[in-house]
Image (cartoon, rainbow, N blue to C red):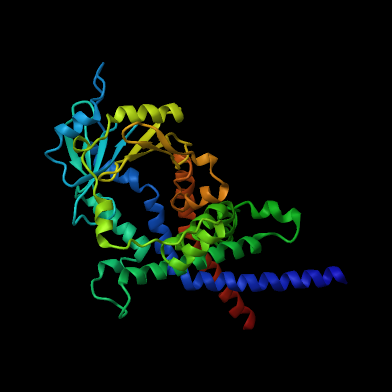
């Protein structure tokens, strides 16, 4: 008798979860189709953009010729550099260009302009403002993914609310529903008996189209459930301040936003000097200190000291098919090269590692090309779920109508 009661209770729970799964899918299905499809393309955003402008990133490696000192390259290319230098990117790949990042007053965006140079000749290759069809396309894909292109509409659709914010609210809400759908779907998928597990892990391609569609929805979703959950649970991080705050507090990494007292302080903090105008030592000397502490091959990202500042920050990141996206960081004294701060990612507490990897967990850049491939496949599956799920619902509706007749 007790066993029968438990079975009946489980059936009711499954039906309740199934109803939730159905309705969150129907409500958010169309938005999710757009978000997941654009997300699939954006997994390889960096690679696509580099493919469209290879002259900026690839250089010929001359025989028996070492790269020029960075100071020499900057001095030679100073005629083209505009604004204050904020950073330098050095690749461990000898066939990659050197990148100098500058920002001037009036620059749109947080990142300023990146200038590309041949590290062996010092020749200027171009800058990140390159305008081509691929860059415009990928920009629209990102806008569609984040804001449903609402940021392209100047006139507010709702008074008092920016269109970009509205678009973020819509995609964020749809992503929350998607996460609920993943969790409820996972519970619904679990067979009542262990012996039926094998059936749930296979796609029966010999069945009719309805059966194949059912298996494609359930089985593929199960195999990609972990990645789908990570994509879903991190997505609203950029849509809702309250969601971001809750996530950070749950991870124990929340910090109150500090607002500068005066606008002049903000202006002074943003001012950084070109290398030859500051007290910065040759970059190679700083890199030597970094390599002594972080003994592996990797890419460097150098953050220039602020005007009058005494510290230079250098990040180093491993490269490879299965390399972590997170980088290690060293802060050095500009004049003495003394280590002020050493931050090794793997030495951080687990909650801090997760908190600093939210973006990587969302876009798949967690362990290099390996996880990017997994995310690309999972995004394709996620794109198919609203379609296969809707077909399952339509078939069930038809069955119900036939039974009533």
Which residue is more in the foreground, 391 or 19? 19
Residue at far bottom of view: 405
Q: Residue at x 14, y 32 (%)?
A: 76
Residue at far right of view: 1
Residue at far top of view: 64
Q: Determine if residue 28 is in view.
A: yes
Q: Is residue 216 above or below residue 56?
A: below
Which residue is more in the foreground, 196 or 299? 299
Which residue is more in the foreground, 58 or 294? 294
Q: Determine if residue 216 is in view.
A: no
Q: Is residue 335 left or right of residue 75?
A: right
Q: Residue at x 29, y 67 (%)?
A: 151
Relative image position of residue 329 (x, y in whole percent): 42, 39
Relative image position of residue 20 (x, y in whole percent): 59, 72
Viewport quadrant of the C terminus: bottom right
Relative image position of residue 402 (x, y in whole percent): 60, 78
Relative image position of residue 361 (x, y in whole percent): 48, 51
Viewport quadrant of the N terminus: bottom right
Q: Quadrant of residue 56?
A: top left
């Amino acid at each position: 008798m007790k066993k029968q009661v438990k079975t009946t209770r489980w059936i009711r729970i499954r039906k309740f979860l199934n109803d939730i799964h159905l309705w969150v899918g129907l409500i958010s299905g169309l938005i999710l189709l757009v978000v997941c499809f654009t997300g699939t393309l954006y997994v390889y955003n960096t690679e696509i953009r580099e493919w469209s402008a290879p002259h900026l990133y690839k250089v010929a490696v001359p025989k028996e010729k070492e790269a020029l000192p960075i100071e020499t390259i900057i001095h030679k290319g100073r005629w083209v550099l505009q604004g204050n230098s904020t950073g330098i990117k050095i690749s461990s790949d000898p066939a990659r260009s050197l990148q100098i990042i500058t920002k001037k007053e009036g620059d749109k965006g947080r990142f300023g302009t990146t200038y590309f140079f041949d590290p062996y000749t010092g020749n200027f290759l171009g800058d990140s403002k390159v305008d081509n069809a691929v860059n415009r396309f990928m920009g629209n894909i990102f806008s569609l993914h984040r804001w449903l292109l609402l940021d392209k509409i100047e006139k507010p659709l709702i008074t008092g609310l920016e269109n970009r914010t509205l678009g973020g609210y819509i995609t964020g809400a749809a992503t929350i529903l998607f996460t609920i759908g993943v969790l409820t779907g996972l519970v619904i998928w679990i067979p009542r008996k262990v012996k039926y597990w094998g059936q749930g892990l296979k796609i029966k391609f010999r069945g009719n189209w309805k059966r194949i569609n059912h298996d494609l929805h359930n089985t593929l979703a199960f195999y990609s459930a972990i990645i789908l959950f990570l994509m879903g649970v991190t997505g609203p991080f950029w849509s809702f301040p309250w969601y971001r705050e809750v996530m950070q507090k749950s991870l124990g990494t929340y910090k109150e936003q500090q607002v500068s007292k005066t606008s002049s302080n903000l202006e002074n903090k943003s001012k950084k000097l070109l290398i030859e105008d500051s007290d910065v030592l040759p970059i190679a000397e700083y890199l030597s200190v970094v390599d002594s502490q972080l003994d592996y091959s990797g890419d460097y990202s150098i953050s220039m000291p602020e005007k009058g500042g005494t510290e230079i920050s250098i990040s180093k990141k491993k490269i490879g098919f299965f390399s972590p996206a997170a980088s290690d960081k060293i802060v050095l004294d500009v004049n003495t090269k003394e280590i002020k701060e050493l931050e090794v990612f793997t030495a951080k507490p687990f909650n801090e590692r997760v908190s600093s990897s939210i973006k990587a967990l969302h876009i798949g850049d967690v362990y290099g090309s390996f996880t990017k491939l997994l995310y690309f496949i999972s995004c394709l599956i996620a794109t198919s779920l609203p379609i296969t799920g809707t077909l399952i619902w339509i078939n069930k509706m038809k069955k119900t109508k036939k039974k009533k007749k």
